[in-house]
Image (cartoon, rainbow, N blue to C red):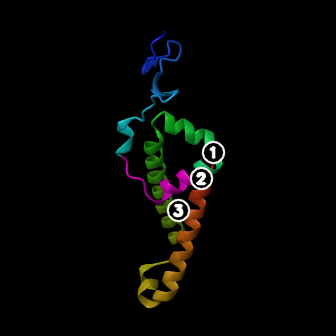
Amino acid sequence: MEQVKDRFIDEKTKIEYVRCGDYYLPNLKLSVEDTNYSIGKYGRMKLNYLKNNKKAEYTILLMEGKLNRYLHEIDIAVSHRVKTIISQLVKQENVTEELKINNQLEWVGKMNSIKNRAEEIAFNELIYM
């Protein structure tokens, strides 16, 4: 009678398998080094986009242990891009501190419009691609 092993390593793939009941399941682990990144609003948006629209890319990044670092880098890049576009639009549309002092409601409306446009541009460039 052949003895049943609790674990074995496939020589071809070098993957360890562990016995669970009547089945052998691959013993896969995510890299620990990939968990120390903070992910903000834009990183979470990219994660949602990958999960819903780019499943293969999401799976590859996850299995290679690069997903959190990638999302962190996207978050930083989008934040930087939004700030850059906002500063350009503020100069282009002449939204000044003087306007802020004299007419706060108009200033807030213009700044909200600029921020929304800047985010939409950055989303199309970096998140929805």
- Say which residue appears at 45% left-offset and 28% top-offset: 27
Does the magenta run of residues contain 36?
no
Amino acid tagged 3: Ile
Report which residue position mark 2 lands on: 49
First in sequence: mark 2 or mark 3? 2
Vertical side of 104 occupied by 111: above or below:
above
Residue 85: numbered disc: 3
Q: CA distance from mark 3 to mark 1?
A: 27 Å
SS for callout 1: loop
First in sequence: mark 3 or mark 1? 1
Q: Are marks 2 and 1 in contact (CB under 8 Å)?
A: yes
Q: Looking at the picture, how far across and down is residue 95, in whole percent? A: 50, 77
SS for callout 3: helix
Q: CA distance from mark 2 to mark 3?
A: 22 Å
Q: Nearer the viewer, residue 109 or 66?
A: 66
Amino acid tagged 1: Lys
Residue 54: numbered disc: 1
Magenta region, residue range: 37-50
Which residue, as the protein is rendered here, is positioned at the far right? 53
Categorize mark 2 by other alpha carbons within 10 Å: few (<14), some (14-19), many (20+): some
Q: Decide if residue 92 is in sight here.
A: no
Of tags 3 and 1, the one toward the viewer is: 1
